[in-house]
Amino acid sequence: MNLDKNVVIDDKKSIRSFVLRGGRLTELQKNAIEKYSDSYCIPFKTGLSLQSESIFNNKNPLTIEIGFGMGVTTASIAALFPEINYLGIEVFLSGVGKLLNEIHTQKLDNVRIIRFDAVEVLQEMILDNSIAGFHIFFPDPWQKKKHNKRRLVKKEFIELMQRKLVPGGYIYVVTDWTPYAEWILEEFEKVDGLVNYASNGYCDPVSWRPITKFEQKGIAENHTIYEIWIEKTIKIRK
């Protein structure tokens, strides 16, 4: 499988897409990609519907993590919940290599990877009403106002995720950038069929999500960690 192919995603849409990122790889990451990508990576293909039955040969709930970085959190959560299937989407090849190594080392049969643009994957490969949950941990906040339009978690993408969720399914977002946290809450409010049960918009820390090195660094710099948990309802607002 050629994971190093530089595929340019069509950017002429309302939701921001990205170019696949290469970067420098460690020997561990190179080795993992060479040995395990055929077993655990799924190539992007239009018209191919991804479900637990087709990927994992079982009917366990399927959760998608968008932008898993180096995959430490992904592997940790998957190890805690072997009865749940996880599909990680990431554009950085180094992160794919790191997670592949974790999958092999920890024998995580409930994790698969797609190295492609998340928007394209959801639009072309994920059925409506089929996903148990979405994880988006510390997405790029695009801090400058002129770059806000590049943010992933905005109305158009939330609507796309909402369609893919099963009733009762969830979207779990974590950020340490206050303006982005406030933006996310405002964007969620624009989408019908979702509910936020937290009184102030932010949920209590979820016990099973591990604290990453990135998060620890933010805490050391006195950043507030904002956790947002949204669920899909059956009732649509009028």
Image (cartoon, grey):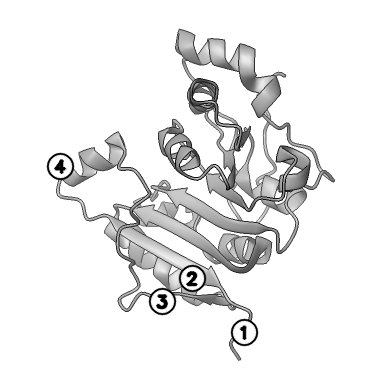
Q: State the image coordinates of residue 199 (x, y, percent, origin top left).
A: 32, 79
Q: Which mark is residue 188?
A: 2
Q: Which residue is mark 4?
A: 220
* Residue found at x 58% / y 87%: 237
Q: Return the disc, 1 or 3, that comes first in the chain's sequence.
A: 3
The type of residue carrying mark 4 is Ala
Q: Which residue of the protein is positioned furthest toward the right in this rendering? A: 47
Q: Secondary structure at mark 4?
A: helix
- Give the mark toward the camera: 4 or 1: 1
Q: Which residue of the protein is positioned furthest toward the bottom in this rendering? A: 238
Q: Return the disc, 4 or 1, that comes first in the chain's sequence.
A: 4
Crowd tier of the residue under label 2, counting other residues whose Cα lies within 10 Å: few below 14, some 14–19, many 20 or above: some
Q: Are marks 4 and 3 in contact (CB under 8 Å)?
A: no
Q: Which residue is mark 1?
A: 235
Label 4, label 1: how far apart the Cα atoms are = 42 Å
Label 3, label 2: how far apart the Cα atoms are = 12 Å
Label 4, label 3: how far apart the Cα atoms are = 29 Å
Q: Which residue is mark 3?
A: 197
The type of residue carrying mark 2 is Phe
Q: Return the disc, 3 or 2, that comes first in the chain's sequence.
A: 2
- Give the mark toward the camera: 1 or 2: 1
Label 1, label 2: how far apart the Cα atoms are = 16 Å
- Give the mark toward the camera: 4 or 3: 3
Q: Measured along the vertical axis of the image, is residue 198 above or below residue 106?
A: below
Label 4, label 2: how far apart the Cα atoms are = 29 Å
In the image, taking residue 95 as reference, residue 237 lies left or right, namely right
Q: Return the disc, 4 or 3, that comes first in the chain's sequence.
A: 3
